[in-house]
Amino acid sequence: MARRLFAILPVIAALLVGRAAAQDRDQQWDRCRLYDERGKPRPGTSPDVAIGACTTIIQAGKETAPNLAIVLMARGVAYRYKGQHERAIQDFDQALRLDPNFAAAYNNRGLAEDDKGLYERAIQDYDQALRLDPSYAVAFYNRGNAYGNKGQYDRAIQDYDQALRLRPEDPAGWNGRCWARALANRLPEALGDCNQALRLRAGDANALDSRGLVYLKMRSPDLALADYDAALKSDPKRAHWLYGRSLARRMKGDRAGADADLAGALRGDPGIVAKYATYGVPGS
């Protein structure tokens, strides 16, 4: 009996080592993912933790090409989160060399290019993501944002339409279309979209900002002021919202309040006045 026990001990030890290695690999994979399946930041992780875990997996050299493409994309997402867009794009490039049919990698590379103001390149990547996956709602939404950044609001609205057809419960899609319709001066439709975004996500600061813009363009400064006040509770120094509130206050004749908000907005973003000048807001 003793001999048999000693004979199987090396086997048990090998199994335990294998199990520990598998557990370590699983932990690294878990840490490598900055976002969950819904696209939300995962509790307890950070971009640096994700980058370190992904790098450990890559350097181990034990993954298949499709798995390695996933890890490279995940690391690229973490680099983008840190604002390191070139490093992010390099990882997305590598992921796509390993898996040219990886729709999510095209979408994420488009986001990094969008961040850099490379809107045409971003649109090309979103196009490819949608060729590979025509039901990719997030890619429609992101392409809508890129067209909006180019000032092509009607084209942006078409993409938001498609995103909402696929994901009607997504408040970001309603807010995106609200913003594009507001800039295209389709104000009643824009107001309806913003209201729906806020029904789906009450108190969302970005939707409040968009509706504030709609109210400014409708010359309803009291309603605009209420929305900007509510948005600024979540981030009192956000330049975009401060400048919107400064315009609402100026419409109401509150010059001192308008000047104070303008000063705060300019501290946060010296180019904010030029941005608003493209929105077609009275008095901007």
Image: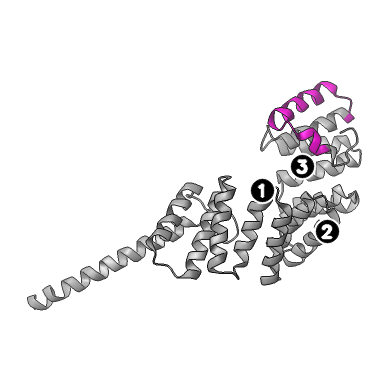
Residue 39 appears in the picture as rendered: yes
Give the amino acid at mark 1.
Answer: Asp
Rounded to the nearest angstrom, the CA distance separating label 1 from label 2 is 19 Å
Name the side, left or right, on which 6 lies relative to 249.
left
Q: Mark 1 falls on what kind of element?
A: helix
Q: Residue at label 1?
A: 115
- Range shown magenta: 251-276
Residue 241 rendering spot, x and y as whole percentages: 75, 36
Q: Is residue 178 above or below residue 68?
A: above
Q: Mark 3 falls on what kind of element?
A: helix
Name the side, left or right, on which 194 lies relative to 57.
right
Q: Mark 2 falls on what kind of element?
A: helix
**Is the residue marked by circle 2 packed among few (<14), some (14-19), or many (20+) residues within 10 Å?**
some
* Outermost left residue: 2
Q: Residue at label 3?
A: 209
- The residue at the point 73 percent across, 28 percent down is 266
Q: Residue at label 2?
A: 155
Residue 80 rendering spot, x and y as whole percentages: 58, 50
Q: Main secondary structure of the magenta part?
A: helix
- The residue at the point 85 percent across, 42 percent down is 279
Residue 91 position by quadrant: bottom right
Nearest to the observer: residue 140 or residue 245: 140
254 part of magenta stretch: yes
Q: Is residue 265 above or below residue 122?
A: above
